[in-house]
Amino acid sequence: KVKDKIPEEDRKKILDKVNDVIKWLDTNQLAEKEEFEHKQKEMEGVCNPIITKLYQSAGGAPGGAAGFPGGFPGAGGAPPGGAGAAPGGGSGGGPTIEEVD
C-alpha cells in the first residue's frame, strides 16, 4: 500500500492541508480564478515534495514530474482538463468554470 510507504508525519501534513483547502473551498465558492489557483499552488507545495520523496525512495519512474508519466495536472505535463484537474488548473483547451456553468 502507498499509505504504508508515506511516513505518518507526511500523511498528517497532507491531510491537514487537504482539510484546510476543503474548508476554504466550502466558504469561498465564489472566489476568483486566481484565488483557486493560489490554493492549488499551496496544495502542490505541500504534496509534491512528499510524493517526489516517495517515488525517489521507490526507485522512481523516468519522465514527468515526480516520476508520474505526464506529470501532475497543472504542472504542464498532463493534458488540459485531465482527470483530477482542479478548476482553473493547467492551460489550454480544457473546460473552464465558465464553460461548465
Image: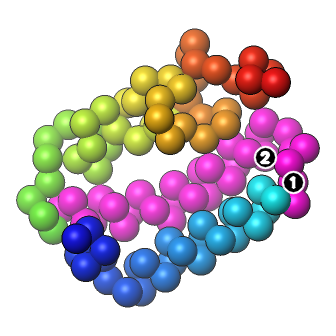
Say above or below: 56 vs 86. below
Q: In the rendered view of the protein, which quadrant contains the N terminus?
A: bottom left
Nearer-N-terminus badge (1/2): 1
Q: Which amino acid does label 1 sit on?
A: Asn
Closer to us: 101 or 96: 101
According to the image, label 2 marks what residue?
A: 35
**Residue 16 position in % (x across, y down):** 59, 77
**Residue 47 position in % (x across, y down):** 46, 62
State the image quarter where residue 18 is shown. bottom right
Residue shown at 34% from the left, 38% from the top:
71
Task: Mark 1 and mark 2 in contact? Answer it, CB < 8 Å.
Answer: yes
Say above or below: 50 vs 48. below
Is residue 41 located in the magenta-colored stretch of the structure? yes
According to the image, label 1 marks what residue?
A: 28
**Residue 77 position in % (x across, y down):** 38, 30
Task: Judge the density around disc 2: few (<14), some (14-19), many (≥20) Cα neighbours within 10 Å.
Answer: few
Say above or below: 67 vs 78. below
Task: Judge the density around disc 1: few (<14), some (14-19), many (≥20) Cα neighbours within 10 Å.
Answer: few
Say above or below: 49 vs 10. above
Is residue 61 located in the magenta-colored stretch of the structure? no
Badge 2 element: helix
**Residue 96 position in % (x across, y down):** 70, 23
Q: Which amino acid does label 2 sit on?
A: Glu
Q: In this view, does 4 lie to the left or right of 30?
A: left
Stretch in magenta: 27-56
Q: In this view, does 85 lie to the left or right of 72?
A: right
